[in-house]
Amino acid sequence: MSRVYNFSPGPAMLPEEVLQRAKEELLDWHGSGSSVMEVSHRGKEFVALAEQCEKDLRELLAIPASYKVLFLQGGASSQFAMVPINLLRGKSKADYLYTGLWSKKAIAEAKRFCTVNVACSSEDRNFYYIPSPDTWRLDKDAAYVHYTPNETIGGLEFHWIPETGDVPLVADMSSTILSRPVDVSKFGVIYAGAQKNIGPAGITVVIVREDLIGQPVAGAPVMFDYKVHADNDSMYNTPPTFAWYMAALVFDWLKRNGGLQAMAEVNKRKAHKLYAAIDGSDFYNNPVEPESRSWMNVPFTLRDDGLDAAFLEQSKKAGLVALKGHRSVGGMRASIYNAMPEAGVDKLIDFMADFAKRQG
Ligand code: PMP
């Protein structure tokens, strides 16, 4: 069996070294005679793992002490609700930047809890750009401003952090977290589902400024209250222990491989060479404005969509899998998260050139 280069948007590729280690430890974790899945989350060994995991994440992202780090369940989709539930704090409205299909979902969910002010939208041009901040209609009385720094489907990414003054900034970093260093102190809340740059699906990271928690909306379910999880070290109920363990292995791998600065350099290089290959050919196209192109998700179309099926079939044979684009965009999408080796991107670029040549 040989491993392929997997361009899936998520669940996505994990570092091979991490998978190997999980395999080696699977039947007998740290001499316990059990797998990590079979031990109590409240036992000494697992608590030590959880503590190390948080410590490593804090170190990787330089998270200030005034922030809580939570390891939850329910995916980023649950955060679409948990954010308003916890951050409204007596207010009735929130600002949302509308830049793609994930921000659309966040907006729809927030509307169940408050008045949503869509401060800007790029829907008019199919989410191919980020509206200039001087056109945003931010409300100074909003409870928070929510945005999606990387739109996984459209391949649109903010390479800068919006300025929102005293209004807390909330970011759905699901598909960009850990791809580069980020100044956490600029945010009220950062959240991310795990299945791209953190680990397997099933665990959700929430980084929240301490002063923002403790005033959930009336009637909020206990499991949706950040404070409950913060006060219980994310063990109010049984956590997804295997996913947590895998995240810990990924954080350890990141630390041993130069941390986020090193990831950023490689990620930038991988993305730039792929966009250069697309732009340099009249066979492929990426419509996103160049300064807002994602480092993590690179959608592209072929000159003739009648060739999509052949492209997918032949790329798969070449060991390049899961390149089919999202149905709303069409064409292809190469998701190139941290665990995608640069050699995988090089191989994709070579394949693309060869395919285009063969089609004339
Ligand atoms: N936000 C973004 C930016 C995503 O890419 C995804 C998943 N692809 C989600 C939210 C939803 O995440 P989950 O499936 O973990 O709920």
Image: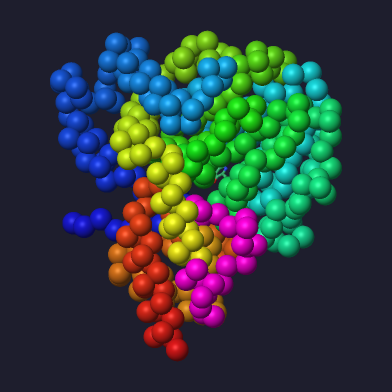
Instruction: Give coordinates of residue 332: x percent, y percent.
Output: 49, 66
In the picture, measured across the screen, residue 162 lies left or right of residue 175, that is: right
The quarter of the picture where residue 95 lies is top right
The reply to whether residue 40 is visible in this rendering is no
| Residue visible at 84% across and 28% down in the picture | 141
Q: Quadrant of ligand 1?
A: top right
In the picture, measured across the screen, residue 172 lies left or right of residue 117, that is: left
Q: How is the image coloured?
A: rainbow
Q: Nearer the viewer, residue 84 or 354?
A: 354
| Residue visible at 46% across and 46% down in the picture | 264
Whether 354 is drawn above or below 28: the answer is: below
Instruction: Give coordinates of residue 257: x percent, y percent.
Output: 32, 40
Quarter of the figure with the N terminus: bottom left
Q: Is residue 360 magenta?
A: no
Quarter of the figure with the C terminus: bottom left
| Residue visible at 35% across and 34% down in the picture | 255
Instruction: Give coordinates of residue 325: x percent, y percent.
Output: 51, 62
Q: Nearer the viewer, residue 286 or 241?
A: 286
Q: Which residues are magenta?
A: 276-297
Q: Is residue 290 magenta?
A: yes
Q: Nearer the viewer, residue 222 or 257?
A: 257
Whether 305 is drawn above or below 240: the answer is: below
Instruction: Give coordinates of residue 163: x percent, y percent.
Output: 72, 37
